[in-house]
Amino acid sequence: MRPNSKSVTTALRKLAKAEIYPDNVSVIATGHGPMLKYNLEELVTRYADWSLEAADQRGCLVLYTADYGYADRLGQTISRGVTKAGVGVEMLDLARVDPTELVAAVGRSDAVVLLSPPSSDAASAANRAVLLSCIKPKQTLLVAESFGGEDEPVDTVVSEMVAVGVPVFGDALRIKVDPDEAIYQLYEEAGTDLAQSLTSKARIASTKNAMEVNVSKALARVSGGLYVITAERGAARSAMIASWVSQASFEPPGLTVAVSKDRAIESLMQVGDVFALNVLPEGDYQPTMKHFLKRFPPGADRFEGVDHAPGGLGSPVLGAAVAHLECRVVSRLDGGDHWIVYATVEDGGVRAPDARTAVHRRKVASYY
């Protein structure tokens, strides 16, 4: 709900100004759970305190047009990608936001995402002009289509922003068919990449300073294997190199995998999802590891040119793997900057019985 925090504080302020709340309110219908009838003052105070704290963070502003095309869901998808990388998000309806509020929101944002509004909407056009007048060259802009049938051309939007000196982040996100899993994956990954571009320097410095030197050297002595996690859901699929993997149970057979919260594959490893653990061989893992360590652009097919085939549960099984395990996610534990994913093993196989698993050793624990 973090992207809606500013809307909560704005709504409460307007209700108070109109002398509607608290005396004339008996029921509150939330957008994420049951209606509230009791203890309203306490609950609203909690909402207000949380929303003020969340809205106070600098971060990313997502501008969309409510009830137009796929803008609502696509905007939420980009917002999810941004928040995965630890950056706050504020969402505003470009067709309904007050110009003064829009100027203030842009001023407290480091980046802006603009989902293309309908070209015939006068209110959206007016607020786009406001955006052009107040956005600064030090801010970053991501432009995306809403697929509503009469989108303002993204090339036009990009040209307007470039003309006032605003750097545009990557290529505009375009849609040619009704959005499917692959499109939502593209939008989420674009949001994550945008957030990472805002925090990369601070994140690297924070990681280096997070551990005392001797602790870092000692923790690095905990070795692990080298694996490729692969997952597929509908038209979306992804992969990542992993070494923080361990058997976790005998009955049922289970294992744990640590997945960074800003990894693209994290969205495909929710409770009930399936994935494959591909075991890399000792001495012959470099080509595979080099491929999957590349930085892929949002929505790119990570399996292009890679020998693979679908496993019994549907996740890609790599030809380079000496063994594979097909797993189903049972639970997830919040591990700070990682999710600890516990999964049961439902299938598997060994391709090279005499091969040994590659081992990953580090000198310090401040990097993988």
Image (tube, grey):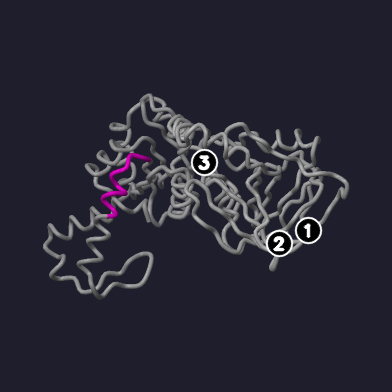
Q: Specify whether 193 is left or right of 31.
A: right
Q: Is residue 52 magenta?
A: yes
Q: Secondary structure at mark 3?
A: helix
Mark 2 neighbour class, 10 Å CA radius: few under 14, some 14 to 19, many 20 or more: many
> Image point 78% across, 44% down: which residue?
357
What label does residue 348 carry, if any? Answer: 1
Is tag 2's residue or tag 3's residue first in the polypeptide sequence?
3
What label does residue 251 carry, if any? Answer: none
Is tag 1's residue or tag 3's residue first in the polypeptide sequence?
3
- Three-letter code, disc 3: Ala
> Image point 41% across, 47% down: which residue?
118
Between marks 1 and 3, how big is the CA–CA gap?
Answer: 33 Å
Q: Which residues are magenta?
A: 50-59
Badge 2 vs badge 3, beta-carbon distance below 8 Å: no
Q: Main secondary structure of the magenta part?
A: helix
Mark 1 neighbour class, 10 Å CA radius: few under 14, some 14 to 19, many 20 or more: some
Residue 116 position, x and y percent, is 43, 43
Residue tagged by mark 2? 345
Badge 1 vs badge 2, beta-carbon distance below 8 Å: yes
Q: Nearer the viewer, residue 283 or 160?
A: 283
Residue tagged by mark 3? 190
Q: Secondary structure at mark 1?
A: strand
Residue 156 position, x and y percent, is 44, 34
- Three-letter code, disc 2: Val
